[in-house]
Amino acid sequence: MIDQQPMQPTILVIVGISGDLVRRKILPAIIQMYTTATAPLPLHIIGVTRQKDFHIGELEGIDVLREHFTLHTMDYADAAGYGALEEKIKNIEKGFDQDSQRLYYLSIPPNAVEDVITSLGKSPLASYLYTKILVEKPFGRDFLSAGLLMSHVEKYFTPHQIYRIDHYLAKPSLQEMTAFFSTQKGDIWNNEHIERIEISATESIGIERRALFYEQTGALRDMVQSHLLELCSVILLGMNDITASRRARQLEQLSVMKDNGVLRVMKGQYVGYTDDVDNKDSLTETFVELSLESKDPHWVGVPIIITTGKKMDKKATTITVTFKKEHVYGSNNITIQLDPCFAIDQLPSSQFHAMPKSDAYEAVLRAAILGDRNLFISDRELLASWKVLEPILQHTVGIKQYNPGASAIEIIESI
């Protein structure tokens, strides 16, 4: 496994610096690390864009990073651009007075990833020893394409150089949740005691500036395949060691439930979505609910219901566990809220200690820089999650419209 040397400088190359994700999440996380002095140093950022008229001043808060930031404009498919990028990297390394590790964060649309990997892989940049590639989800569009893309990337980079991001694994509230599991007394985390598990991630906003991205993904690929299935694997593991291999084993046991041969899946699209993406014929879902079951002996017979959607009544990510009989805390339900803040219903808050304020993307960037792979998705997890969704992707599921601001119950009733 290739990792950086102790205290090795880092050059973080963000491909797609002008994109929405960078503005909303990545750059604020970097700025926060600098302002709180938690950034692993030395660190220099190179922002890569193909927009010739883009300038640094368009990035909010960039003044904090002026001395540590370089802008590079290039066509992602132009070999000369990668040569010029290499020269900039070498010039920055002269200031470090030692070799750096190089992280390439691909914050670009899914359909551009393969081409950038190819161009980067064919350039001299790929031969540098301490190179890491950070890739945002979704990785592929289904089980087959994910496997093909995985094979394609491995033509140029080793599996240990690839860091697939799922920022849900880095959420501080998820760490709070696992701390909660560790406080539980007795063996209650199994099908002997639990009747069902419900995982919900809803948003009150629409697609904002992500029309192109969302038309390529939809709710199933955007939220379920990555974030919510990973969250599901963590929940099923409970207080046990949450490693990538153990998460993968849980995912491999999951499948979509059926009623008389019909998949238990519902899809919806909020009224006005077709205007937001300027495509009146769009069949992209903005809401989905599906029921899963597990072959794991500890979870056989426990339905796992996943719900996610945009332009709904509230922003919240919750896990509700329903027990079969009266629980020690006086309720058959425990609801764990991860967003917008961490909370546990039915338990005294005094039992839990507040964690230091932190952002998931800060944790992701810091882990990548330090070579900690525990917050990233393995090949095995990736393929397992796509396999769970394969029956849905291979069969047509009708999409009904729902009014913005509706609750999950209202949407399901209308569908």
Image: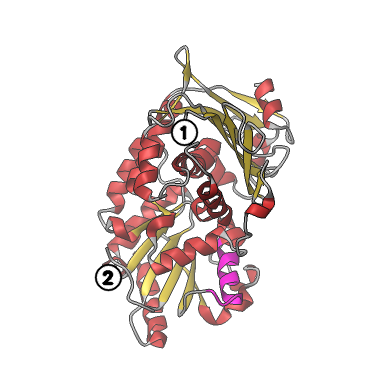
Residue 32 x %, y %: 60, 70
In the picture of the structure, the residue carrying the numbered disc 2 is: 129
- Is 168 or 285 nearer to us in this picture? 168
**Residue 356 in the image: above or below residue 110:** below
Q: Is residue 69 magenta?
A: no
Our reading of the magenta stretch's main secondary structure is helix
Does residue 17 show up?
A: no
In the picture of the structure, the residue carrying the numbered disc 1 is: 190
Give the residue displayed 38% in from the left and 70% down from the top. Answer: 102
Give the residue displayed 39% in from the left and 63% down from the top. Answer: 372
Quadrant where the image shows the C terminus:
top right
Label 1, residues with CA under 10 Å away: few <14, some 14-19, many ≥20: some
| In this rendering, position of residue 221 left or right of residue 104 | right
Q: Which residues are magenta?
A: 26-38
**Circle 1 SS class:** loop
- Is 133 or 119 nearer to us in this picture? 133
Q: Residue furthest top?
A: 260
- Is 391 or 141 nearer to us in this picture? 391
Residue 321 x %, y %: 58, 35
Disc 1 and disc 2: Cα gap in Å? 45 Å
Residue 181 x %, y %: 52, 46
Give the residue displayed 71% in from the left and 32% down from the top. Answer: 407
Residue 14 got which mark?
none
